Amino acid sequence: MNSKLDRKFYNRDTIEVAKDLLGKLLVYQVDNKKLIGKIVETEAYMGPIDKAAHSYGGKRTPRVEVMYGKPGVAYIYLIYGMYNCFNVVTREEGRPEAVLVRALEPVEGLDEMALNRFKKPYNELNKKQIKNLTNGPGKLCMAFNIDRSLNKEDLCENKIFIKKQEFEEKFDIIHSKRIGIDYAEEAKDYLWRFYIKGNEYVSVK
DNA sequence: AGGCGGATCCCC
DNA sequence: GGGATCCGCCTT
């Protein structure tokens, strides 16, 4: 049974996609290593009307161009000169909206994630390092070794994709203000951040 | 050609 | 609370 999310999943209302991505598994395979993390926190970026979005006002530059493309494609950009952020493009072509994946719960490939983050295997991590493995947008990209070389990668293919869990759990979804967008005037107060209530790997409680 | 600020993280 | 660090974008 193929449980990979298809193009239709992403070609929907961005807030619905952001909420529905919670509890899904991000899978990234490089060489013979497989990394899997459960998505526990997301943010919706609503395009031209959203002052926090890169595509606000219909801005169309080389960097943002991916957001105007087809849904189900990765939009990865460099932030603060050092960190990468992983997004999935939503909505039909020409409509530049996306979901930022802000935190994962590690599921498979923990040693590889620990090496990528802290240069040592998982069983040598201290409590703080375990907690900080993937609980933020930059951190999860470091743990998965995701950078801009994966920008525009099609998540409906096999290199990197998102799938349903075999047994989907029940959880409560918290709605909150988005993080790190204080410049966005009224948009900073919109409740477009979503996370799994009580999950240990949520970036900011 | 230059200046500036950022969808972050980490340490003090 | 502040520094790291650099690309993209806007202004000149």
Image (spheres, coloured by chain):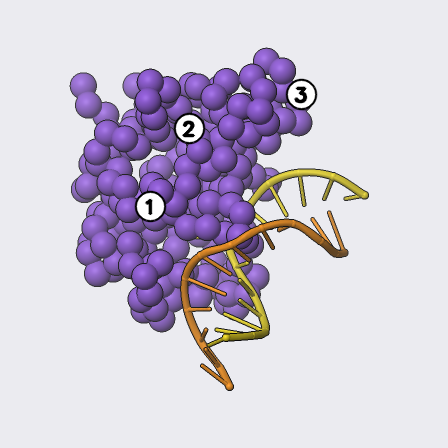
Chain colours: A purple, B yellow, C orange
Which residue is identified by label 1?
A151
Name the one closer to the observer, A168 or A122: A122
Residue A153: tell me if it is visible: yes
Which element type, helix, strand or loop, lies under badge 2?
Answer: strand
Mark 2: few, some, or many residues within 10 Å (few <14, many ≥20)?
many
Q: The N terminus of chain A lies in which quarter of the figure?
A: top left
* Residue A65, picture quadrant: bottom left
Say what amino acid the circle numbered 3 marks.
Asn
Picture coordinates of residue A162, whole percent (x, y): 31, 32
Residue A64 is drawn in which quadrant? bottom left
For badge 1, the amino acid type reads Asn
Residue named by callout 3: A126
Badges 1 and 2, same chain: yes
Q: Can you identify the residue that label 2 sits on? A: A38
Dot placed on the residue nearer the N-terminal end, 1 or 3: 3
What is the distance, in whole Å, between disc 1 and disc 2 at their CAs?
21 Å
Instruction: Tell me the kind of residue under disc 2.
Output: Lys
